[in-house]
Each structure stands twice: as C-alpha cells, then as structure tokens.
Image (spheres, grey):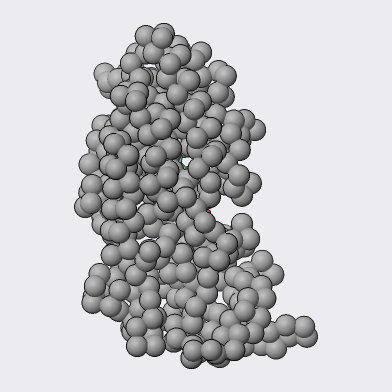
Amino acid sequence: MNHFDYVNGELCAEDVPLSRIAAELGTPFYCYSTATLVRHYTVFRQALEKAGLDATICFALKANPNIAVVRTLAGLGAGADVVSEGELRRALAAGVPAGRIVFSGVGKTRRELELAVAKGIMQVNVESEPELRALSEVAAARGVRMPISLRVNPDVDAGTHAKITTGKKENKFGIEWTRAHEVYRIARELPGVEVVGIACHIGSQLTDVEPFRQAFSRVRDLVAILRADGFDIRRLDLGGGLGVPYDAATDLPPHPDDYAAAIAGSLGDLGCRIVLEPGRLLVGNAGVLVSRVVYVKEGATRSFAIVDAAMNDLMRPALYDAHHDIQPVAEPAAGAPRAEIDVVGPVCETGDTFARQRPLPPLAAGDLVAFRTAGAYGAAMSSTYNSRLLVPEVLVNGHGFAVVRARPTYEDMLALEALPDWLE
Ligand code: LLP
C-alpha cells in the first residue's frame, strides 16, 4: 500500500497534488511520501514481531540515501546498512545511532574500516580473508576488537535479475560457503576482531521465499558447525532482498509476514538476534519520479512521448529492463482510450527508454507523468550524464512538503572542474 492516489482528478502524494510541487519546483523531481515510509517500516516490523523474532532492521541506505528519508526511518527505530564512507557519514548525519549501523560491501578500504572502528558501529560484515586481516590490524592499532560477522556466500540461486543476484558461488560476494569455517578459525586468532555472527545476502527483488529458505537453512547448518567449535554465534544478519510489486499485474512478491515466518521457521529457535537489511521494501513504493512530456512524436511505426526525465535520472529501465508503472498526473477520464506508446527521455541513446509499447491514455506536450515505485534505486543511482543536473527530491508529509535535496545550478555543475594552466 502507498499514499499516491488520485484525489479530485489529480495524482497526489498524501494530501499534496504533484502538480503543485511541479509548479513550484519545475520538473523532473523525485517525491517521497512520509506516510508510506512509516507504513512500510511498520508493516515490516510488525511482521517480525508477530513471528516472535528479536530483530534489528538496518535500512540499506543504497536504496535511498537522502538524509531526510533516513531520518524518517531512524525516527521509527531503524538502524542502517552502509557500504561506503559516504553512506556511513549519511547515516550518522541522519541521526542513526552508531550502535545500529552495520557495514557491508566487498571492497571496504582501510580508511573506511578506520572510520567504522572510530565510530564504534554495531558490526562489520567481512567479505574476504584479506579484508578480515586489514580490519583486525586497523582495530588492533586502536586497541579495540571490532564485532564482526563473516558474509558467507551460500551458493543459492535467488531467481532474480542476473545483475542483482549475489548469492551464487560465481558472484563476487562473501566467503565461499565451504571455506567459511576455515576463515572463522582465522578470525578467532586475530587480535582486532570479535566474531559475533554470520551474515548473508543472496540478491535483490526476490519474489519468492524459497531461495531465502535455502539460504537460511545453510546459515543454520553453519551456526551448528561454529557453535560446536566453540564460537559464540549470537547475531544473524540475513541481508535484504525482499521484492516489491513494480507491475501490479504480474509481480506478486511474498508478504513480509511470509518472509518473517520463513526466518522464524528456519532460525527462530537459535537464540540469535536477527539483523535485516531491507532497502527496496521500505522505500520503493514510497517514491515517484515526476516528469513533463516535452513532445509527442509520431514515428514511422510507433509514437513516442519524449519526457524531460531521462536514463540518468532513473537508470533502472536502461540497466535492468525494469518496469515502472507510468501514470498521467491528471486523472484520465473513465474509459479513456489507451494506445501503445514508447516513453523515452532526451538522452542520446536508444537505451534511454522508460517503456516500450506501453498502453497509456493519450498524452500531450506539457502533461505531467509519474513513474511509480521509484523510491528505491532511483535518485540513488542517478548521474549527470549528458550534463543534465541531478533532479531535486521532495518529501511530503500530510499537507506539506519540503525540498530535501535542491536542484543544483549550472554553476554548481561546473564548480569542481578547472582548466589546467596550459589551456588557460
Ligand atoms: N544488503 C546488501 C548486502 C545488499 O547488497 C543489498 C542490495 C541490500 C542489503 C538491500 O537489498 P534490497 O532489500 O533493496 O533488495 N540497483 C538494483 C538493486 C541493487 C541491490 C544491491 N544490493 C536495482 O535497482 O534493482
């Protein structure tokens, strides 16, 4: 459920018509709904509670790192899953307590590990033996033992898009399942780390609980092996990955209740604190990208609606052939005819296509359209390709809204560049 609905013929974010924001701010812009963020977090937390799980929800900042979004979730009790110094700094700036931050990622630098140690975060999820040794050195130099989980790669097929599956043995992530025990033993001998648990994340946009179950069962086996060897395994970080319905007609991801029941069924009796790293699930449906139709062009074989947003603003269709529902902001008349149209951006690549042959009500130049389910991996993945400015982000709360990331100026765009003296 989300809070983007037609009210009096206008698509609104909660009580704010998107056209009002467009009039004030120009287009394109991202718009997030506080009520939807709150709802998604609450549904997820309640699912875990109902399943009797002692869980910490660490929002995966990569899905939407805007500090206002992170603060909204932190205010509800969320921690953070971060994968870079930038995300760690954002989580702290948004008010996430260090004790609720986990640091994931396959290539953390020493500088990043130093910051994690200095800030005293909850744990580092270590993905390789060299990283383990580097972290131990960094922490020992400060006289601390850093709590760690090893991220294991359970060699499970998540059944999702190849570019976002992470838990197969040929993927770069984690420590091979079969070598995990050996690396835990190395960790035990190192002065700067303290093993507290196991971490695992098998992929993103999963629409079936079965791959999760397979991974959980491997985690369970590993808990038994490690405990038998004297390790005090007390936290299980199960990553993120639960999918959202991008296309209401075809996507049927499991309800958080089913996901929580799968966790409880596989791991609930082990006496471990469960850590989860949902990203998309919390923010995906809480955001839209609003854009204006610049031209409608009749091509030789099809029509194109050329909008002012492009692949640099929302990369998912170009990168993953992802589907995003597209809705006119002005509600189409009941029974309005639909015709197939390609919705494209102005960037000079054919890949800059949001939808091919999408049946949509008639669109005309000047119309506003909303790309739905754009709250996750939308603004987060945007770039300035074609020297287009990053688009602003707006957070709605009831009747009000605030710009939570301003549109930069062209002066900002040029500010970090310089001509070397031989070109002046
Ligand atoms: N934890 C780890 C270690 C991850 O690598 C990820 C996502 C998450 C948690 C959060 O996963 P989520 O709950 O959002 O599925 N750009 C792609 C998605 C990449 C996901 C990368 N890792 C997309 O737009 O679909």
Residue at the location (66% across, 81% down)?
340
Q: Quadrant of residue 224?
A: top left
Residue at the location (63% across, 46% down)?
162
Quadrant where the N terminus sits is bottom left
Residue 294 lies, with reference to residue 91, above or below; the image says below
Q: Quadrant of residue 192?
A: top left
Please give left or right for residue 214 compared with residue 390 in the image.
Answer: right
Q: Quadrant of residue 227?
A: top left
Residue at the location (53% across, 89% down)?
335
Location of residue 233 in the rendering, given as x and y in whole percent from the top left corner? 35, 20
Location of residue 394 in the rendering, given as x and y in whole percent from the top left corner? 33, 70
Residue nearest the viewer, comparing 336 with 424: 336
Question: Is residue 76 visible to the viewer in this orientation of the structure?
Answer: yes
Residue nearest the viewer, comparing 345 with 237: 237
Residue 108 lies, with reference to residue 9, above or below; the image says above
Residue lying at the far right of the rendered structure: 300
Residue 157 lies, with reference to residue 9, above or below; the image says above
Please give left or right for residue 171 compared with residue 112 in the image.
Answer: right
Location of residue 265 in the rendering, given as x and y in whole percent from the top left corner? 41, 32
Residue 322 lies, with reference to residue 135, above or below; the image says below
Residue nearest the viewer, comparing 292 with 214: 214
Instruction: Tell how many labels.
Output: 0
Residue at the location (49% across, 78% down)?
327
Location of residue 97 in the rendering, given as x and y in whole percent from the top left corner? 22, 41
Question: Is residue 404 visible to the viewer in this orientation of the structure?
Answer: no
